[in-house]
Amino acid sequence: MIELRAAETDDELELWRSVRLAILPNERTASVAELRAGGSFMLLAHRDGELVGSGSASKSDMGGGAVTPRVLPAHRRQGIGTAFIFQLIQVARDAGVRAVMAETKTNNLPIGRLLAKCAFQLAGVDTHRDSNHDLVKESATLLWYAALD
Ligand SMILES: CC(C)(COP(=O)(O)OP(=O)(O)OC[C@H]1O[C@@H](n2cnc3c(N)ncnc32)[C@H](O)[C@@H]1OP(=O)(O)O)[C@@H](O)C(=O)NCCC(=O)NCCS
């Protein structure tokens, strides 16, 4: 059974970090103190007691709540990412935002398919998000929205 719960204690936030570090080893991951200061809602997914993923929802400066799900490779394609999205949408709804947004890379097919399946609409392509050469690097940014009203 998949269990989603908020990461609140320092130990839980360390678990949240461990998922991000495992999936994005070459990117900097915020410390527990930084996560606390950031004010985002953090979520952990366990299945039968085993950590399988983490997600977050934050109030963004783009008019909605931004959601990010991450599932450890061995546990993908089993509905956990979808469960995250629905839970994070609920968090955003409770926070009173008008829409949920997600930012993805054009070369990340799984998250694009997942968002489309969860009724997110593609709202824009940002070709300068990371650098002045995003198109050359084939890593432009897609902006997705799901309206909550
Ligand atoms: C994107 C991610 C969260 C999906 O998690 P998941 O638990 O595998 O997702 P689900 O099992 O709920 O998949 C739901 C749907 O998404 C699509 N999907 C998921 N993985 C896919 C893949 N590898 N290829 C194509 N479509 C995929 C499918 O439509 C799938 O439905 P289906 O299995 O019935 O075909 C996971 O691949 C992941 O953690 N990726 C790395 C981190 C990341 O990029 N996060 C997004 C940051 S914005």
Image: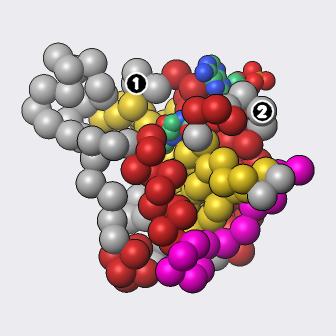
Q: For the residue with label 2, is its CB less than 8 Å from the closest atom of ligand 1?
A: yes
Q: Residue lying farthest left?
A: 132
Depicted 126 relative to depicted 49: above or below: above
Taking the magenta stretch, the answer to whether it contains residue 83 is no
Residue wearing tag 1? 106
Depicted 19 relative to depicted 103: above or below: below
Name which residue lies at 57% across and 26% down: 110
Kind of residue at badge 2: Gln
Nearer to us in this view, 75 or 107: 75
Nearer to us in this view, 42 or 61: 42
**Stretch in magenta:** 1-12
* Residue 40 shows up from this direction: yes
Residue wearing tag 2? 78
Tell which quarter ligand 1 is in. top right
Specify which label sits upstream in the sequence, 2 or 1. 2
Local SS, label 1: loop
In percent of width and height, residue 95 lies at: 63, 76
Depicted 37 relative to depicted 46: above or below: below
Q: Within 10 angstroms of label 1, few (less than 14), some, or many (20 or more) residues?
A: some
Name which residue lies at 27% across and 41% down: 26
